[in-house]
Amino acid sequence: MSQALTLARPYARAAFMIAKDAGAFAPWSEALGFAARVAADPQAAAALGHPALVREQAVELLSPDDAPAAFCDFLALLADNRRLAMLPEIAALYEDLRDEAEQVVKATVTSATALPTSELDTIKAALRKRFGREVEIETAVDEALIGGAVIAAGDVVIDGSLRGKLSRLHSALAS
């Protein structure tokens, strides 16, 4: 585990608990996502690391207009502890905690061509049955798969692509 994730974890948990207590998972997700994107920008990162930057300036830069007041306080804490650069890791860990609390599995379906909605619905239903949780699907297209799809959900990867089948056949023939 990287040092950045180790240092970011307590902040992500704190953000999660504040959002949970306020019943505000979605607003915190949006605010953390915004702050993480800003903090990841090279120009913003340089400004955030500048010793002359005061806490209020950092909070103003990183806060979306509709951010909860508690979120601004959270950013001020990060600024005081010189942890603003960790916002991308904090946001990612927060989303993991939120998904766990809301019983959601995120899956990526990569196919050789765009899949019709009916096929995605079938995949979503099968994954929901397998994991016993709600499933959110992201799609991607990779023509190198030739046909079929690769489904990645958490630690599970299901390779039903033609490229994967050819690779397994090649390995079997080589043995």
Image (cartoon, grey):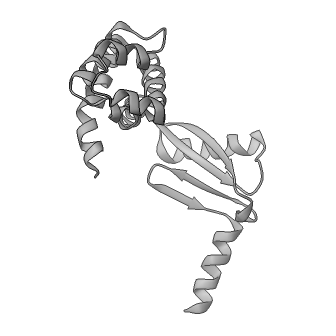
Does residue 49 appear in this view?
yes
Query: In the image, residue 131 lies at what x, y percent?
Result: 48, 45
* Quadrant housing residue 164: bottom right
Which residue is rendered at x = 24% and y = 43% of the image? Answer: 6
Does residue 103 appear in this view?
no
Q: Is residue 71 left or right of residue 132?
A: left
Query: Does 147 appear above or below 82?
Result: below
Which residue is rendered at x = 40% and y = 33% of the image? Answer: 46
Query: Does 119 appear above or below 101?
Result: below
Q: Nearer the viewer, residue 74 or 25?
A: 74
* Quadrant housing residue 89: top left
Q: Is residue 164 left or right of residue 30?
A: right
Q: Is residue 76 left or right of residue 67?
A: left
Query: In the image, residue 136 lies at what x, y percent?
Result: 56, 36
Query: Does 18 appear above or below 69?
Result: below
Which residue is rendered at x = 40% and y = 35% of the image? Answer: 88
Q: Nearer the viewer, residue 162 or 18?
A: 18
Query: In the image, residue 35 lies at what x, y percent?
Result: 43, 24
Q: Nearer the viewer, residue 113 or 117?
A: 113
* Quadrant housing residue 14: top left
Which quadrant holds the C terminus? Answer: bottom right
Which residue is rendered at x = 27% and y = 26% of the image? Answer: 51
